[in-house]
Amino acid sequence: MKPPPFDYHAPRSVAEALDVLAAEGERAKVLAGGQSLIPLLNMRLAAPGHLVDINRLTGLAGVEVEPDGVRIGALARHAEVERSEPAAAAQPLLRQALGLVAHPVVRNRGTVVGSLVHADPAAELPAVLTLLGGSVRLARRGGPGTPAAGSSTAQDVAAGGSFVVRDVAAGEFFTGPLESAAGPGELAVSAFFPALPPRSGTAFREVARRHGDYALAGVAALVVLDDDLRITSAAVACVSAGPVPLLVDVTGECGHRPPASAGWAGAARAVQDRAEPEDDIHATAGYRRHLIGVLAERALRDAAREALNG
Amino acid sequence: MAERTHDITLVVNGTVRRAAVPGRRLLSDCLRHDLGLTGTHVGCEHGVCGCCTVLLDGEPVRSCLTFAVTVDGREITTVEGLADGERMSPVQRAFAECHGLQCGFCTPGFLCTVTALLRDNPVPTDEEVLEGISGNLCRCTGYQNIVKAVHRAAEIMAEES
Amino acid sequence: MTTKLFGEPVRRREDPRLLTGRGRYLDDLGRDALAAAFVRSPHAHAVIRDIDVSAALDVDGLVAIYTWEDLPDRLAEPLPLLIPHPALTHGRTAYPLARERVRHVGEPVVMVVARDRYVAEDACALIRVDYELLKPVVGVEEAAQSAQLVHDDVPGNVGARMVQEVPSAGGLDVREVIEDAPHTLAFRLDIERSASTPLEGRGVYARWDADDSSLRVYSSTQTSTSVRMAVAAKLGLPLPKVEVIAPDVGGGFGVKIVHPWPEEVLVPWAAMLLNREVKWTEDRREHFVSSAHERAQVQFVRVGFDDEGRVLGLEVTILHDHGAYTPYGIIVPIITSTQLPGPYRLGAYRVEFSSIYTNTVQVTPYRGAGRPQAVFCMERTMDRIADHLGLDRTAVRAVNFIQPEEFPYDQGLIFQDGRPLIYDSGDYPESLRMLKELIGWDSFPAEKERAAAEGRRIGIGVGCYVEGTGVGPYEGGHVQVTSDGRVHVSTGLTSQGQGHETAFAQIAAAELGVPLERVSVVTGDTRRFGYAVGTFASRAAVMSGNAIALACRKVREKALRIAADALEADPRDLEITDGMVHVAGTPGAAIPLATVAVLSNPLRYAFDEEAARATQFAGAASFDRPPVPEGDEPGLEGRDYYSPIRSTFASGMHAAIVETDPLTAEIRILRYAVVHDCGNLINPMIVEGQIHGGVAQGVGGALYERMVYDGHGQLLNASFMDFLMPYATEVPHVETAHLETPSPLNPLGIKGAGEAGVIPVSAVIASAIEDAEGIPIDKMPISPSELFDLRRAAS
């Protein structure tokens, strides 16, 4: 179990990284934390000709908490985001979910953006991004052009050349199991997780075989209340419920009611009905579907409680 | 055709070490075979077992999921660097005292993980200990004495500080 | 024994080395050795049409490529069938490299030697093997009925069929007894595959010394002496020219008792041929597909019993999945079939097993070695009887127990060592009493009721076992006191974390009356001790422990004789304390053991001042007899062997309380209690550790681990991602209590403890889940998904 040979690139700037990615296209893979990629390499299930190691692009390391949300750079490790108090205050679902990502030692190295680009439908962060309506910022080498509007970080990372960036909404970003909208030549430079609106709460519930394993099923929930503490919106995003994170708006099922009398069970059934889980060696599709219902109800209730307490 | 190598410098257990490694050289292999520090063990090479855990700038990481070239210029602590000269560290002594190891193969990974855990959280609860070591497999001990050893190490550290 | 060391929780002497990174495991050796890697079959069943290595030849750093065609003489023959048995009518073993046919995914086909492992794997990836696919035979029941054969000359895929039958006291056969019994039950039980999965895989490192025509082999093995004999035989080398050393070994649990593995003969052969050091370190994926698995059985049970639950007759028919080959014979199903009666006196018993070939990894012992299946069968049967009669589950067990006054108790069966299965000692009623107290058995119903009122489901389970430990044929020990007063102990069997360096040193220090620090122990090194069997079957402490004790007694006797001469005392008045031989009660008259060692070796040359005392003009000698008297030997050393008449039988009982989530069907172990009886304890700390680790493996086998083969014979979970070895977060705290019923069979009164923890766990967890859920549990392991399905089916 040793990786196959590849040409190793250690760019010192985003521009340099994009040059290699542009030149090598499909043959190149980006290495950030490596916690998903290197196992695949060690098992020789992937054999990229070129590896672009972005670990020296310190400009991508930040976790910026802005009024409207949290922007996480491509080199920010899970653990760093998990520990960040401002990030947790702005969007508590991040910490709730990150605590379920593998184990602490893996989180020391793995990156949030890397998890998103890896696009594993069994992983937590794609579901979080989907539920919150976040986005991933992709950069690529372009002719003379202007950075996308509002992309302040683009200037920071652009030192040394022109390139174009695009923000892809979560709904379009995850295109299939282990497939994302990031194309050849593109580098995910950051991800944006919108802040928690007022009078709202989140929760993440999952069942895994062992603590730290990929979830058999998992549900992230977001509940928003109005001034009268009635539910104005409720939604979940599910893990291991289909080829991509499954987003279900259950506002209608919950009814415009206070959480105590909301139709949680009906909401959970609605989520369950939309799920398309698959059989695997750890669980049947039927069991996963059942779990999604149970977890959806638990997560929604928890999120509503958070909303009331917040 | 010979594979291209990269000259790297690592500060391992406080000593500057140099090596010429191919891009694909895993940090675990670099430490073990290029630098002769065989205390870091390799149990799965896909990041699950935790045997290969070392401290990278003080933080525990899987050396089998890290390329040596990526950490050029960084500081690494391996199990060989935990003791203070001939005197074992509190964590090492606690493992001996509590019978926290049997075959010893997973032990270096546990020691590195626990060393960082107690540095960040000197008096962990049972739950925090379990979470802290939850990414390390042991096939011999059933973990009970490892958990005991972590608490004992915390005690020793408190006594000696 | 003058120094109280035996029975003390002495800290382990191997730990400082292992805690500081100074352990030396296989892959830590041979830094400059060439690396071997293997092309392994990706197919479960195929004919090899052609092997094309041409694309690999250009790989920079490639040294050699070998296929079966290259193997000379005896290396080209199938590997040995280690334990032949008359019932194993169709034993089959693999070739070191596949010859024409592959029979499981992972079977080695081509060996590559290269500068390092990376390059070796590069070359492997470029070798093209052309396979003609055959229909794979997967699943033991399918194999038993299949027209497709794993081995063309093994009809019905049946490697062995064996029956043992013990008629009733009245001479009735079991079927008659069951027919006539007041109550009868019949059911089927299933256990799936698991595996040892030590964290260090296998590995072999060989150095050929061309000047000396000698070979040194390091192997991560549980038996270095037997690997040595196999290597010498396969390579045609004189035995004295081959040495095999087991260095620090990162866990074994059974898989490393098998030998010689293909790599164990191929790597030394390549080292000789290339005149270069060669090393192979198994990686995790290789370990899953090319080592060994265990456990899988289907059992058909019929039992007849009376109104109190007394078993009048028990008939069990077992289909045992043996995988593709039988290098270790049929030891596993023999153990299942003979250990099945456990602590019970069965009215009549008949057991039949068929050992079936399938196109999967071979099956050889994994900690417990057939006993977890046996105990699952017997204990599920006990629970069924209790359920049928509406009796307490422990009451049914109690009424069937062999009583303390009935020992030695002959079960009337032939055990795995070919000798009668006679229990030497035990106290099962006391063990059960202690267990019930420890877990709070009698107060549990109230606890369960309280939990139910809170909407929680909890259940309690129990399991009892008897384990034959310390099987022969023998082990030996050598003890030498050198003139510096140090005591050097060696024994041939090997260590994989059991703390032998400590336990054996405790025995030697206690026997000789020397401080523990002065004793050093070497295991598994044929340069130090050439005769041994190996470490398996919970035998190391019993076998080598007693052999070392006997060797120490020889040394002690000699030391007292020499000291008596020097002190002009009667040897019967002497004792040894803290390394000083002295007259009991007379503090002044003493001589250090070191000096005795000097005097034991009459010298011509004084290599140091101390040695001068033993030289020819030192004046101590008597002129009436030669310097080394007839029948004596120079030196203060002794060698002895322990070869028991038969196995000694340890026992234990476990209980657990589990909680099942009414909605998610998650299963959590709330409490786990163990009462364990392995006779006299040498080091209670080490025994406890063995139990903890065994229970953890048992929990893995009960709730998490399985080998999932698809219909094509592909192992779908050949990684630690998907083979779910428990982490700390999955293993319960284990509460233990010890009962010490000494074995009358050996000088130290000890019994084995290594495997105990794992044996009853699946039975106990099944019992507890059944109690919580009210649904029969007859298949293990069980996952939440499966429990969910059982609930659906039951409702």
Image: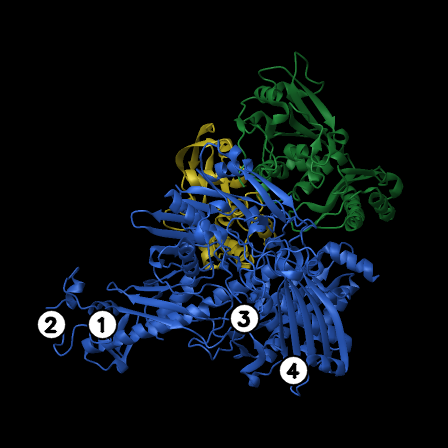
Mark 2: amino acid? Gly
Mark 3: amino acid? Gln
Real-space CA distance between mark 4 and mark 2, rounded to the nearest whole angstrom: 73 Å
**Residue at which label 2 appears:** C619
Q: Secondary structure at mark 3?
A: loop
Mark 4: amino acid? Pro
Q: Is residue C524 visible?
A: yes
Question: Compared with residue C324, is residue A117 higher up or lower down, i.e. above or below?
Answer: above
**Residue at which label 3 appears:** C416
Asked if the residues shown at circle 1 and circle 2 are in contact, with their CB atoms under 8 angstroms apart, the answer is no
**Residue at which label 1 appears:** C591
Q: Quadrant of residue C109?
A: top right
Q: Secondary structure at mark 1?
A: strand
Residue density around tag 4, few if under 14, some if 14–19, many if 20 or more, within 10 Å: many
Mark 1: amino acid? Ile
Q: Nearer the viewer, residue A32 or C276?
A: C276
